[in-house]
Image: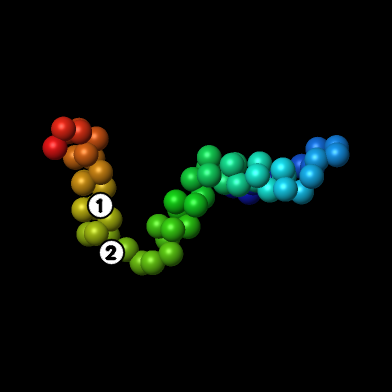
Amino acid sequence: MAIRIKARSGEPVEQMMRRFKKLCEKEGLNKDVKRKQFFEKPSERRRRRARKSDKRRDPIS
């Protein structure tokens, strides 16, 4: 899943970089990189997902 940006005619580099960053954020690459930066044990992963699920189910507490 490579993100490719084609330069539009007369488009400044800064605007291209903004479009690239938005696409990366939309694809969730930033979150993925941060999550994979350190090893997470499978039990910790399950625990994190269970907490996330609980928050979705019961937003009051």
Left or right: where 28 falls relative to 20: left
Q: Residue furthest right?
A: 10
Q: Nearer the viewer, residue 39 or 34?
A: 34
Left or right: where 52 falls relative to 14: left
Q: Quadrant of residue 36?
A: bottom left
Answer with mark 2 or mark 1, whichever residue precedes in sequence: 2
Q: Residues within 10 Å of mark 2 (few under 14, many from 20)?
A: few
Instruction: Determine the residue positioned at 24% across, 59% down.
Output: 44
What amino acid type should be assigned to the residue bearing mark 2?
Answer: Lys
Q: Residue furthest left?
A: 61
Disc 2 on helix, strand or loop? loop
Residue 8 rendering spot, x and y as whole percentages: 81, 38
Q: Residues within 10 Å of mark 1 (few under 14, many from 20)?
A: few
What amino acid type should be assigned to the residue bearing mark 1?
Answer: Arg
Spatial CA distance of label 2 from label 1 is: 11 Å
Which mark, by number, is residue 41?
2
Instruction: Determine the residue positioned at 80% across, 40% down.
Output: 11
